[in-house]
């Protein structure tokens, strides 16, 4: 059996994020997924080392790498539309579930069990951590755009910061206090 799974996954780089906004630096789903994976790994390490958690940082990183994989088939629906009303949100979740199942079915049967938890997350604790990493990545994008003088991201920066604060995750609060301020600095200021 030939499988198109990884050829599809490699197409994440063609799906642009923030399509409704002017970007100084365009971002695609592959770039975002990498950053979300780095952040999910960091949040899991912080949870384990500072707060006694047990989420495997490697699993957190892998789940974040695939958290938007359904967008390979669906495209990226902009947040203001996706969350405009409950009916759209429910319908889009259904579309995402169909896309996730279709991607999983592309894999040879003997590999599906290994990829199922990455494509179809059923662990609420892991899901909350990956969602936090996803929102953190979006907030960092907003900060980078603001740093470049793009005020188009001002409201999005405020909304994503409020969403992060609403997560109520101690590892996220730690990251926001310890690491986030550096993202607003220039390279010279980081020295």
Image (cartoon, rainbow, N blue to C red):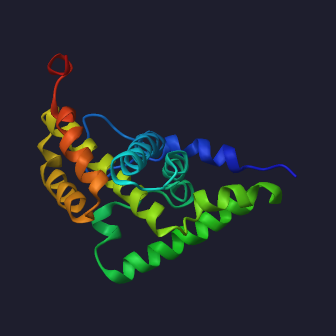
User: How many dots with numbers?
Assistant: 0
Q: Residue at x 35, y 69 (%)?
A: 82
- Quadrant housing residue 187: top left
Residue 10 position (above or below residue 76):
above
Residue 126 pos. (x, y %): 47, 61
Residue 144 position (above or below residue 107):
above
Residue 94 in view of the camera: yes
Which quarter shows the C terminus?
top left
Q: Residue at x 26, y 40 (%)?
A: 23
Q: Nearer the viewer, residue 184 or 90?
A: 184
Residue 21 pos. (x, y %): 25, 49
In the image, farthest residue toward the bottom? 87
- Quadrant housing residue 159: bottom left
Q: Residue at x 44, y 44 (%)?
A: 41
Residue 20 in view of the camera: no
- Is residue 49 shown left or right of residue 114? left
Q: Nearer the viewer, residue 162 or 16?
A: 162
Q: Nearer the viewer, residue 42 or 121?
A: 42
């Amino acid at each position: 059996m030939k499988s198109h799974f990884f050829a599809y996954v490699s197409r994440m780089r063609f799906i642009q994020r923030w399509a409704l906004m002017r970007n100084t630096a365009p971002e695609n789903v592959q770039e975002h997924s990498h950053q979300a994976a780095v952040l999910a790994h960091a949040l899991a390490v912080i949870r384990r080392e500072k707060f006694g958690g047990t989420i495997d940082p490697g699993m957190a990183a892998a789940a974040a790498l695939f958290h938007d994989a359904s967008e390979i088939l669906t495209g990226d629906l902009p947040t203001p539309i996706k969350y405009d009303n409950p009916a759209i949100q429910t319908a889009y979740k259904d579309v995402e579930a169909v896309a996730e199942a279709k991607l999983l079915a592309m894999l040879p049967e003997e590999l599906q069990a290994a990829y199922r938890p990455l494509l179809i997350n059923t662990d609420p604790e892991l899901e909350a951590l990956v969602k936090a990493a996803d929102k953190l990545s979006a907030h960092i994008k907003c900060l980078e755009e603001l740093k470049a003088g793009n005020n188009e991201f001002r409201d999005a920066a405020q909304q994503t910061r409020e969403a992060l604060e609403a997560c109520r995750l101690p590892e996220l609060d730690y990251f926001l206090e310890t690491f986030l301020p550096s993202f607003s600095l220039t390279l010279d200021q980081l020295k």
